[in-house]
Image: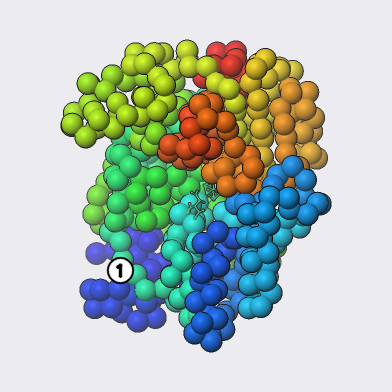
Amino acid sequence: MGSTLAEKVWNAHVVRRGDGGEDLLYIDLHLLHEVNTPQAFDGLRAAGRAVRRPDLTLGTEDHNIPTVAVDKPIQDPVARRQSELMRANCAEFGIPLLRIGDAQQGIVHVIGPELGLTRPGMTVVCCDSHTTTQGAFGALALGIGTSQVEHVLATQTLAMRRPRDMAVTVDGVLRPGVTAKDLVLALIAEIGTAGGQGHIVEYRGTAVDALSMEGRMTLCNMTVEAGSRAGMIAPDATTLEYLAGRPGMPRGAAWEAEAARWRALAGDPDAVFDREVVLDGAAVRPFASWGTNPAQSVPLDGAVPDPDGFATASERAAARRALEYMALAPGTAMRDVPVDAVFVGSCTNGRIEDLRAVAEVLDDRRVAAGVRMMIVPGSAAVRRQAVAEGLAEVFDRAGADFRAGAGCSMCAALNEDRLRPGERVASTNNRNFEGRQGRGSRTHIVSPAVAAATAVSGRLAAPDDL
Ligand SMILES: CC(C)[C@H](C(=O)O)[C@@H](O)C(=O)O
Ligand code: SF4
């Protein structure tokens, strides 16, 4: 029996077999940000241990930092304290750190790929659930908790039981205007927020093959919202094209050899998955969430569902509570839902292609009166590129607020970018939990194109509606 992509990467990293229990895996790349890491460093200090491979470890500031000015001292006391701790810890343990204002700084899951650090066949870990993003390269990329961070810092290994294998196969051609974001929302709406639990998902099929690397990252990013441990896509020509020429990539014959090795990582044709889900790519429509978890999503053509229509009592109760929190009435057409704000950014959709999609819609249009639109680049490099391509001017002319700094911003409202209680936002992020974007905030998760069209119309809308 052949091996899956995940199995191949896993087996190549086993330092010690756990005999049915936890294997000990070697970790190739360890990324850090300022949240969830201070306790790990405290643990190291208490045990008198050093960081085993600071050269395979990189930190960035992304969650708490402001996005208004990158060249001034951080004003918010909590954010300043988090950054100070991160800076002190990285300096003490010899770990390189990208700070606010640095040319390469950005959201951890955006910069790993951007800097060519994330490569096919690697094991990548980070103290953050959306590390799954980086599985788009055929890496095994896992979010880990604080005690695991300490373990990896000290040993460069991680103990873990191998998750089961799940295949998500999407054939067919996505319609114009339908993006990876819509695809993953459709998937989560279908399988639920626990649908991938205990599994590593491998995405495959012609619709996945046709996605850009950025689209693939969006897909793998939200894989964790279906409860999956990781998402992966086998490296192909698109992957190699993205990686070629990035910092640290080999050249000439060495590149050819590496590329051949990466391509051989693809799962064997006779590999067996524990579970398979099949979606028709051609049937996917632009999606938006209506509730307080990402599975509570419907096509934009649809309506807010009636809680009584759900199959189980717990689903009915969850839908009722969600509608109350979201202040939505069953049967309301999704396109009739007005918004106060639009947020474009996050590790799901804060990359250059996302900003291009937004600029295409905003070009020669204005953000609707009464709507605030904030666009936050996923990295400093994304911002520079957006300026170079003239996208920043389009945003300005449209009346959108294109932030100077890169970071998580209003995705999780861990800095000062947050909504006021009761405000409703169309957001390109990945989570819509109660209070996610500020206390009492109401989030509709959408694609960048839908976010931009919504900003112009003032109600949930797709570009074709304008
Ligand atoms: C703060 C961090 C630990 C958290 C995560 O793990 O995902 C955050 O990035 C999020 O998106 O909620
Ligand atoms: S952008 Fe949002 S989802 Fe991504 S790491 Fe930051 S807070 Fe988490």
Kindly identify the amino acid type of the residue bearing the numbered disc 1: Arg
According to the image, label 1 marks what residue? 161
Q: Judge whether 446 appears above or below 15 on screen.
A: above
At 46% from the left edge and 48% from the top edge, which residue is drawn?
Answer: 220
At 71% from the left edge and 17% from the top edge, which residue is drawn?
Answer: 365
At 49% from the left edge and 40% from the top edge, which residue is drawn?
Answer: 436
Regarding mark 1 in the picture, which secondary structure is present there? loop
Badge 1 local density, few (<14 within 10 Å), some, or many (20+)? some
The colour scheme used to paint the residues is: rainbow
**Rendered location of residue 143, percent (x, y):** 45, 59
Q: Judge whether 92 appears above or below 227 on screen.
A: below
Viewer-nearest residue: 40 or 130: 40
Does 55 sit left or right of 7 as displayed? right
Viewer-nearest residue: 309 or 372: 372
Q: Judge whether 396 appears above or below 166 on screen.
A: above
**Rendered location of residue 151, percent (x, y):** 45, 76
- Can residue 107 be seen here? no
Does 37 sit left or right of 206 as displayed? right
Viewer-nearest residue: 222 or 204: 222
Does 453 sit left or right of 102 as displayed? left
Question: Which image quarter holds the C terminus?
Answer: top right
**Rendered location of residue 52, percent (x, y):** 55, 82
- Can residue 466 be seen here? yes
**Residue found at the very far bottom of the displayed protein:** 48
At 53% from the left edge and 37% from the top edge, which residue is drawn?
Answer: 438
**Rendered location of residue 43, percent (x, y):** 49, 77
Q: How many marks?
A: 1
**Residue found at the very far left of the displayed protein:** 312
